[in-house]
Amino acid sequence: LVCASKRVIFATMLVLDGKIAAAAVKEQIAKEVQLLIAGQKRVPHLAAILIGNNPASQAYVGNKVKTCAELGFESTLIAEPAMEEADLLSLIEKLNKDTTIDGILVQLPLPKNINEEKIIMAIDPQKDVDGFHPINVGKMAIGSPSYLPATPYGIMLMLEHFKIETSGKHCVVLGRSNIVGTPMSILLSRNTNPGNCTVTLCHSRTQNLAQHLLPADIIVAAIGIPFFVKEEMVKHGAVIIDVGINSIEAPEKKSGKRLVGDVDYEALKEKVSAMTPVPGGVGLMTIAGLMQNTLNARLNKPN
Ligand code: GUN
C-alpha cells in the first residue's frame, strides 16, 4: 500500500512469533537427542540453581526445567530459599566435577549476600550454558566458538528463522546489560549471518535518544521501561525486537496485572515491517538458546 505521502504502510506487519521460531529450534534439538538415545549415549543434562524466592525467577527456572523434559534432556533443579556464598561455591565446584552434568545455570539476580561475579567466575566455562563467564564473553567478542548468552543468542536464532536481512543494516540496541544489550551489540556487529550490522548502543546516559533511534533499520529494546519506544521514534518499515518483560497494573484482568514490552506495540504495528510480541516473542527464544547451548555443551561443540 502507498499512501498520499508516498510512504509505504506495512499493513501486513510480520509478527516475529517466538512460539513458531522456538518450535523450529526445539524440533532440531529433540532430533539430536533421539540420535543420542539411538546410539545409547547420555542425553544432555542441565543443572539449574535458584536461590531466593523471586516470583519471576521461579517462573523462568520452572519453564527451563519443563522445556528440558519436553526435549528429552535430564535436568536437576536445586532451589533454596537462601544460601551462603561459600556453600554456593562448593555446590558449583561439585557440579563442575560431575561428568554427568553438561550445563550449569545459576538464575540471576542472586540475593544480596552473594557476589554474582564470583559465582559466574566459579562455573566451568565449558559448562557455562548462560555464556556469562568472561572466558565465553571474551571468545564471543573475538568471534571464537563459545557459549552465547541465551537471550541474544535466541534473538539471533529468531532473525535467522524469519530470514530478517541484517547485513549492512543500522541496528540500535537500547540497554547495555551484560545479559542482553552488550552481547547483542557484539553479536550483531560480527562478520556473520545474521550480523554485519552497523550498531549503535544506547543507554541511560545517551543524549537525544530519539535522534539515535529514528534512522534505525533494526531496534533491539532492552531497557525495562514499559512502552518506552513510541511511534514517533521509529521509522517506517523498521524491524523491532522487544526484549522487555514488564508487569503493569491491569484492573480488567483477574490477576490485576499484565505483561508488556519496552515498545508501544499497538501504536507501531502498522508502521514497522516486523516486530516481536510480548509475551510470546523473545522470552521463548531465550529458552531455545539455553537448550541449544546445553545440547552443544553435551556434544562439546560451542558455537
Ligand atoms: N536472569 C535474567 N535473564 C537471565 C538469563 O538468561 N540467565 C540467568 N541465569 N539469569 C537470568
Image: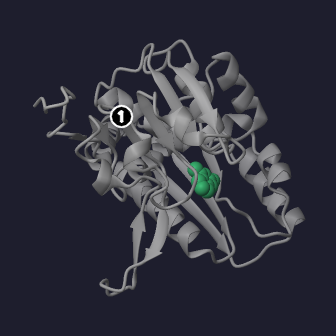
Amino acid marked by disc 1: Val
Q: Where is residue 211 in the image (x, y as percent from the top left)?
A: 54, 35
**Left or right for 4, reference 240:** left
- Residue topped by disc 1: 239
- On screen, 296 above or below 103? above
The residue nearer to you, when weighing 45 against 147, is 147
The residue nearer to you, when weighing 152 against 278, is 278
- Quadrant holding the C terminus: top right
Q: In which quarter of the image is residue 126?
A: top right
Which residue is found at the position 34% from the left and 46% from the top? 276
Q: Position of residue 51 (x, y in %)?
A: 70, 70
Which residue is found at the position 34% from the left and 20% from the top? 165
The image's colouring method is one colour
Which residue is found at the position 72% from the left and 45% from the top? 205
**Left or right for 114, reference 2:** right
The residue nearer to you, when weighing 194 against 217, is 217
Q: How busy is the neighbourhood of tag 1: few (under 14 within 10 Å), some, or many (20 plus)? A: many
Q: Position of residue 25 (x, y in %)?
A: 34, 37
- On screen, 156 above or below 100? above
Which residue is found at the position 52% from the left and 43% from the top? 151
